[in-house]
Image (cartoon, grey):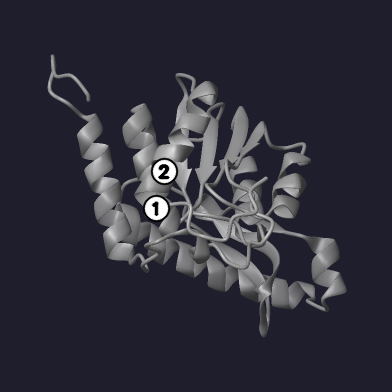
């Protein structure tokens, strides 16, 4: 485990290069990388480029307790998929009517973001594929946990979660998850504080930048016959 308190990565692209080395052993012919927007797109794009893998983005929305946005009680994704942690929702006093309203609002946002990222193109199939979820770091793990639940509803053959940096207690929790094939995190500093402190450049990423990078990465994989990737 890493107790360092200075940046580990120059930027998200550098973090993606390091993560790519860690993921080599898991790659198979059906491997799909799914980035968690928006910062995760920059990390995932470098992994996809170095390993010559298909890259897409997981369009989803966390369901949060009203007026307590940090408390996640579920998630909604494309294709009408939604997950609600019923026990937690009841514990937090969120009834069925409120859950329905949260789901409806989240599905509208998911549809809007799907159009923004893909236009009319459908989301890729996850069925019987190895799906690797990538983000730029996990401060609490709630976003990644919600993403895993959404992907599980599409019946992949296995799910891998990968991030460049996360606190050791969050890593330990994900490593115990029975629905994960693997959890990959090369740096697990004890003094975590925030994801951004481990990057020299942790600039905000816009949807426009993320969409452009996804297009560029996809186009780079479609090479003329006889060309060689570098």
Q: Position of residue 173 (x, y in %)?
A: 76, 48
Label 1 and label 2: CA atoms lie apart by 6 Å
Q: Position of residue 132 (x, y in %)?
A: 53, 37
- Residue 188: in sight, yes or no? yes
| Residue sitting nearer the eye, 149 or 188 | 188
| Residue sitting nearer the eye, 182 or 189 | 189
Query: Relative to residue 52, is residue 228 drawn left or right?
Result: left
Label 1: few (<14), some or many (≥20) within 10 Å?
A: many
The N terminus is located in which quarter?
top right
Q: Taking 209 as reference, is 50 above or below it? A: above
Q: Position of residue 57 (x, y in %)?
A: 42, 49
Dividing the picture into quadrants, the one containing residue 50 is top left
Q: Residue at x 51, y 30 (%)?
A: 23
Q: Taking 96 as reference, is 61 above or below it? A: above
The C terminus is located in which quarter?
top left
Question: In this figure, which residue is indicated by the disc labeled 1?
Answer: 12
Q: Secondary structure at mark 1?
A: helix
Question: In this figure, which residue is indicated by the disc labeled 2?
Answer: 16
Query: Relative to residue 226, is residue 60 drawn left or right?
Result: right
Q: Taking 161 as reference, is 136 above or below it? A: below
Query: Relative to residue 8, is residue 53 drawn left or right?
Result: left
Q: Residue at x 37, y 33 (%)?
A: 54
Q: Residue at x 33, y 56 (%)?
A: 117
Label 2: few (<14), some or many (≥20) within 10 Å?
A: many
| Residue sitting nearer the eye, 159 or 138 | 138
Q: Residue furthest top?
A: 226
Are discs 1 and 2 less than 8 Å apart at CB? Answer: yes
Q: Position of residue 203 (x, y in %)?
A: 36, 67
- Residue 124: in sight, yes or no? no
């Amino acid at each position: 485990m890493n107790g360092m308190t200075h940046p580990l990565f120059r930027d998200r692209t550098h973090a993606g290069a390091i993560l790519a080395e860690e993921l080599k052993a898991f790659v198979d012919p059906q491997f799909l990388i799914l980035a968690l927007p928006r910062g995760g797109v920059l990390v995932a794009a470098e992994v996809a480029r170095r390993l010559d893998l298909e890259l897409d983005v997981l369009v989803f929305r966390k369901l949060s307790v009203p007026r307590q946005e940090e408390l996640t009680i579920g998630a909604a994704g494309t294709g009408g998929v939604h997950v609600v942690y019923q026990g937690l929702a009841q514990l937090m006093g969120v009834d069925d009517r409120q859950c329905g309203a949260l789901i409806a609002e989240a599905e509208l946002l998911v549809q809007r973001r799907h159009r923004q990222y893909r236009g009319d193109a459908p989301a890729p199939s996850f069925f019987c594929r190895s799906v690797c979820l990538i983000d730029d770091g996990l401060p609490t793990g709630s976003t990644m946990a919600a993403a895993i639940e959404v992907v599980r509803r599409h019946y992949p053959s296995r799910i891998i979660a990968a991030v460049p940096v996360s606190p050791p207690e969050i890593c330990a929790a994900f490593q115990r998850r029975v629905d994960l094939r693997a959890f990959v995190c090369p740096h697990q500093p004890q003094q975590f504080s925030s994801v951004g402190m481990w990057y020299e450049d942790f600039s905000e990423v816009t949807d426009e930048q993320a969409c452009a990078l996804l297009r560029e990465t996809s186009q780079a994989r479609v090479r003329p016959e006889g060309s060689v990737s570098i």
